[in-house]
C-alpha cells in the first residue's frame, strides 16, 4: 500500500504532533491489538476490514484500497481520526476508551459470576451485567464521534465552500450513522445530533484550526476532484456545479498563478 506524499506530510506535521506514535497500517496484514479486536468485531460486522477505518492507540488501520480514492478524501478521513487521537492523548487512553465504550464495557463485570460461584444467587446476579451488551445509548461515544464529524463539516465548509443548505443535508446524513448500527446505535435522537453538529463551539479550538490550515495550505489544490462521501443526487449536483465554477475561475488566472502540485 503506497501512501501519497501529501498524506505523509500530514502525518509528520499534524498527526504526530498530537500522537507521536501515529502510523497508518494496512488491514490486509493485521497484527497486534487490531488483529484481536477485529476478530471480535467481525462477529457482528463482517465489513470491518473493507469499509471501516479503525484507530487503536495511535495505529490507524485502513483497508488496502484506502488510497485508491482521491487523496483529499483520504485526508479528510484521517483528519477525523487524528481528532480522536488528540482527544485520547488529552484525556488519557484509559478514560478515553472507557468513555467511548460505556456503557457496553460494563458487561465485562459479568465475569464476576465465576468468582461468585458458591455464594448463593450472587453469581446469577452478576450475569445481569450482560444486559449492558444491549444497544443502550452511549453519551460518551456520541460526544467523541460528534467532535470527529465536525471535522468533516468544517472541511466542507471552509475548504470546499459548501452552501449552508448542503452542510445541513450532510449533517442529516451524518446523524444517521449515530442512530444506526455503524456505531452500535449510540444515540437514537437524530434531531439532537443534527443540532449539535451545527454548533460552532469548536471553531477556535487549536486542533480544528491546525487541521483546517493543513487543508488550505496543502490539500485545497485537489478540491475539484474530491467528493468526500457517497452523496445524495441533489448534493452531488450542487458539488459538481460549484466545482465547475471554481475550475472556470482558476482557468482565468492559470497563466499568472499556476496550480500547485503535491
Image (tube, grey):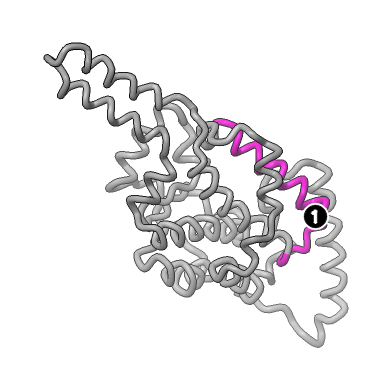
Element carrying mark 1: helix
Residue drawn at the location 49% of the way across and 27% of the way down: 135
Magenta stretch, overall SS: helix
The structure residue drawn at horizontal position 39% and vertical position 61%, both measured from the top left corner, is: 89
Would you say 121 lies left or right of 243 here?
left
Q: Residues within 10 Å of mark 1 (few under 14, many from 20)?
A: many
Which residue is at a point 70% across and 44% down the rendered structure image? 194
The magenta stretch spans residue 172: yes
Check the picture and name the quadrant holding the C terminus.
Answer: bottom right
Identity of the residue furthest to the top in this view: 120
Q: Is residue 220 above or below residue 126?
A: below
Query: Residue at label 1?
Result: 239
In percent of width and height, residue 42 lies at 41, 31
Quadrant location of the N terminus? bottom left
106 horizontally vs 192: left or right: left
- The quarter holding residue 118 reads top left
Of 116 and 224, nearer the camera is 116
Give the image location of residue 223, x and y in percent. Answer: 71, 64
Which residue occupies the extreme bottom position in the image? Answer: 256
Q: Nearer the viewer, residue 138 or 65?
A: 138
Quick check: is 238 in the magenta stretch? no
> Residue 218 is drawn in which quadrant?
bottom right
Q: Residue furthest left?
A: 118
Count the numbered circles shown: 1
x, y percentage for residue 82? 49, 60
Relative height, residue 114 to residue 108 (above, below): above
Q: Residue at x 54, y 56 (%)?
A: 80
Where residue 249 sits in the image (x, y, percent)? 86, 73
Q: Which residues are magenta?
A: 158-181
Amino acid at each position: 500500500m503506497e501512501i501519497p506524499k501529501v498524506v505523509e506530510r500530514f502525518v509528520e506535521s499534524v498527526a504526530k504532533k498530537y500522537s507521536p506514535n501515529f502510523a497508518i497500517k494496512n488491514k490486509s496484514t493485521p497484527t497486534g491489538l487490531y488483529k484481536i479486536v477485529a476478530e471480535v468485531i467481525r462477529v457482528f460486522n463482517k465489513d470491518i476490514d473493507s469499509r471501516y477505518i479503525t484507530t487503536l492507540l495511535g495505529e490507524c488501520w485502513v483497508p488496502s484500497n484506502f488510497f485508491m480514492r482521491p487523496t483529499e478524501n483520504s485526508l479528510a478521513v484521517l483528519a477525523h481520526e487524528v481528532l480522536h487521537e488528540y482527544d485520547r492523548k488529552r484525556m488519557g487512553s484509559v478514560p478515553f476508551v472507557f468513555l467511548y465504550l460505556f456503557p457496553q464495557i460494563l458487561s465485562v463485570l459479568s465475569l464476576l459470576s465465576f468468582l461468585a460461584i458458591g455464594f448463593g444467587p450472587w453469581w446469577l446476579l452478576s450475569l445481569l451485567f450482560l444486559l449492558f451488551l444491549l444497544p443502550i445509548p452511549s453519551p460518551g461515544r456520541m460526544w467523541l464521534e460528534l467532535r470527529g464529524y465536525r471535522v468533516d463539516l468544517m472541511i466542507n465548509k471552509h475548504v470546499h465552500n459548501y452552501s449552508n443548505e448542503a452542510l445541513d443535508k450532510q449533517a442529516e446524513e451524518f446523524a444517521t450513522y449515530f442512530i444506526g448500527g455503524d456505531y452500535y446505535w449510540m444515540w437514537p435522537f437524530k434531531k439532537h445530533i443534527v443540532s449539535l453538529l451545527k454548533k460552532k463551539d469548536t471553531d477556535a479550538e487549536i486542533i480544528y484550526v491546525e487541521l483546517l490550515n493543513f487543508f488550505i495550505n496543502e490539500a485545497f489544490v485537489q478540491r475539484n476532484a474530491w467528493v468526500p462521501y457517497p452523496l445524495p443526487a441533489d448534493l452531488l449536483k450542487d458539488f459538481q456545479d460549484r466545482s465547475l465554477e471554481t475550475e472556470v475561475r482558476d482557468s482565468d488566472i492559470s497563466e499568472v498563478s499556476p496550480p500547485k502540485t503535491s
